[in-house]
Image (cartoon, rainbow, N blue to C red):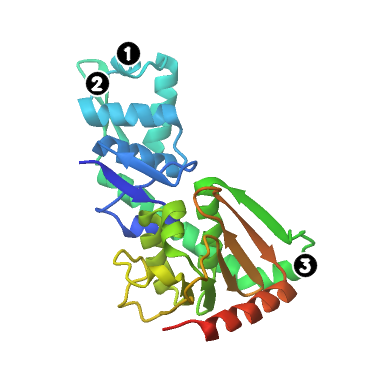
């Protein structure tokens, strides 16, 4: 059975150990049809070169062998095979044995991959906590230019844009959200994973749905989600584009037909859009 995993970040994937696996950096979804693909994807996330991954996966699949046979199986030159083995041995992923004067190489305990992954995530967490702790001071000391408007194209671009919201905690987001159109452009798997992380970070939503979506059974923001307050626009108030307001940002997402989005970062603009949202909110039905 194919294994489908949505990628929001490294930690979220690690928390799903046993249920999912990592995706390649350039995509938001990867379909795994073999356990070796899972190993390959994890090692890629850990920065292990492709040639080294080929060697390790070959050893896992076929058992211990010589460098000559590894070169034949992987298509890598023999000198390069030795280089990859040297790298893998640093991670305790390959063991070496001498049998009758011949050197054989084999894959180490595959559970070592999990240990390496755990160490990597722990280091990332430490780095993130250190950065968060000093972020205000770093912002004050640097002269980075923050663009006021950023554009994103395509499904993956729009998904990446919406993830910005998940950097926040304990906030309330005001949204005009035509659910059917957003489901089409963002995808069900992405929205479900997004919703889980949003709830984890205590991000509440005030959403206005289109009038005709009141009876939708398919819903990523479920009724048991107490962090969502929903109202429905008046009849005749149809819209296909969404916008979300939080902090000093307003995020716009088009329908799948045009598949683009943009973020406006401006306190004044966010205040103006929030004022308009309140008018719609008060005029919408529960």
The spot of residue 112 in percent (x, y) is 30, 46
Place residue 200 in its image quadrant: bottom left
Give the x, y percent position of residue 49: 46, 33
Callout 1 crowding tier (Cα within 10 Å): few <14, some 14–19, many ≥20 = few
Tag 3's secondary structure? helix
Disc 3 and disc 1 in contact, CB within 8 angstroms? no
Is residue 197 visible to us here? yes
Question: Which residue lies at the image location 40% right of the left edge and 45% below the top edge?
Answer: 29
Above or below, comparing residue 102 to residue 42 in the picture: above
Disc nearer the start of the sequence (3/1): 1
**Which marked residue is nearer to the observer: mark 2 or mark 3?**
3
N-terminal of the pair, mark 1 or mark 2, is: 2
Quarter of the image with the N terminus in it: top left
* Residue 63 seen in this snapshot: no
- Residue 67's place in the image compared with 265, above or below, is above
Is residue 93 or residue 281 the one in the foreground?
281
Give the numbered dot on residue 65: 2
Residue 138 image position (x, y, % from top left): 71, 67
Left or right: where does residue 258 sit relative to residue 147? left
The residue singled out by tag 1 in the image is 72
Residue drawn where x is 56% and y is 62% of the image = 164
SS for callout 1? helix
Foreground label between 1 and 2: 1
From the viewer's side, name the closer residue of 137 and 261.
Answer: 261
x, y percentage for residue 209?
45, 71
Task: Find disc 3 in the rendering and name its residue.
Answer: 141
Mark 2 neighbour class, 10 Å CA radius: few under 14, some 14 to 19, many 20 or more: some
Task: Report helix, strand or loop for mark 2.
Answer: loop
Mark 2 or mark 3, which has the lower sequence index?
2
Report the residue at 38% width, 15% height from top. 75
Query: Separation of disc 2 and disc 3 at Cα?
Result: 55 Å
């Amino acid at each position: 059975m194919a294994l489908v995993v949505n990628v929001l970040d490294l930690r979220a994937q690690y928390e799903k150990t046993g249920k999912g696996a990592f995706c390649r950096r350039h995509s938001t979804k990867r379909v795994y049809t073999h356990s070796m693909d899972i190993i390959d994807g994890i090692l890629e996330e850990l920065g292990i070169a492709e040639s080294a991954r080929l060697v390790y996966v070959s050893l896992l699949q076929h058992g211990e062998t010589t460098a000559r046979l590894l070169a034949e199986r992987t298509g890598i030159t023999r000198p390069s095979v030795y280089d990859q083995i040297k790298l893998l041995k640093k991670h305790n992923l390959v063991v070496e044995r001498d049998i009758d004067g011949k050197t054989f190489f084999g894959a180490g305990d595959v559970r070592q991959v999990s240990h390496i992954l755990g160490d990597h995530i722990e280091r990332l967490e430490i780095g993130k906590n250190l950065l968060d702790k000093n972020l205000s001071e770093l912002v004050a000391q640097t002269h980075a230019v923050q663009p006021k408007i950023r554009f994103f194209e395509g499904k993956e671009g729009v998904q990446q844009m919406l993830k910005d919201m998940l950097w926040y905690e304990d906030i309330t987001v005001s949204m005009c959200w035509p659910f059917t159109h957003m489901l089409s452009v963002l995808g069900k798997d992405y929205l479900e994973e997004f919703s889980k992380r949003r709830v984890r970070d205590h991000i509440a939503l005030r959403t206005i749905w289109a009038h005709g979506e009141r009876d939708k059974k398919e819903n990523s923001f479920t009724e048991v989600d107490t962090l969502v307050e929903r109202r429905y626009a008046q009849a005749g108030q149809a819209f296909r584009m969404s916008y979300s307001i939080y902090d000093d940002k307003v995020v716009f997402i088009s329908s799948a037909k045009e598949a683009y989005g943009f973020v406006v970062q401006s306190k004044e603009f966010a205040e103006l859009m929030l004022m308009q949202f309140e008018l719609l909110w008060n005029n919408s039905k529960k």
